[in-house]
Image (tube, rainbow, N blue to C red):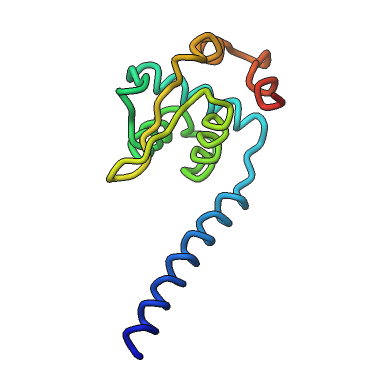
Amino acid sequence: MYKNSLISLKKYHKIYKSCAYALQLIMVKVKRSEYIIVSRAVCRELFKAGCFGKGSIYFDNLAKGLKDREFSKLNITKDKIEVVLEALVKQNICGKKKKEHGWKYYLNMDRYDKIKEIIKESGSNSIIPILLML
């Protein structure tokens, strides 16, 4: 009896943790300007690292490298970076694969032209909001 209740408590705890994590991601608000800056930096970092398909990088390493260089003056957290990465995955610009230590992200070679546009653009003229509408 005690063993069964312990197992059911563990199951509920796992469900609670996953729901709490999903709620945390939903509650993170990303401004449009932050989205443009983060997506440009993420694409640039993945492109420099040569992450196309086979070559990929773990989320923690990607976020750690981006936070130090690109966002020192902005209030951009790891959660916001993850929200932007998930949006890039939905747009099929980036891809992700599950590995034993977490998620690994890479750029999609089929969208190479869009990736190059995102990396090269500067200033207020951005293609990223247009891609969000698609």
The location of residue 80, given as percent across then percent down, is 54, 41
Query: Residue at the left extreme?
Result: 100
- Indicate the position of residue 35 as horizontal and vertical percent values: 60, 31
Q: Quadrant of the C terminus?
A: top right
Query: In the image shown, does 87 or 31 lie closer to the viewer?
Result: 87
Q: Position of residue 117 (x, y in %)?
A: 56, 10
Residue 2 sits above or below residue 99 on the image: below
* Residue 56 in which image quadrant: top left
Residue 1 in percent (x, y) is at 35, 91
Residue depicted at x 33% and y 31%: 57
Indicate the quadrant where residue 8 lies.
Answer: bottom left
Residue 118 lies left or right of residue 67; in this view the side is: right
Q: Is residue 22 left or right of residue 95?
A: right
**For this rendering, which residue is in front, 120 or 88?**
88
Location of residue 58 (image quadrant) = top left
**Residue visible at 54% across and 25% down?**
92
Identify the residue shown where x is 61% and y is 50%. Answer: 26
* Number of marks in the rendered image: 0
Q: Residue furthest bottom?
A: 1
x 46%, y 34%: residue: 72
Q: Nearer the viewer, residue 15 or 74?
A: 15
Q: Is residue 69 above or below residue 123?
A: below
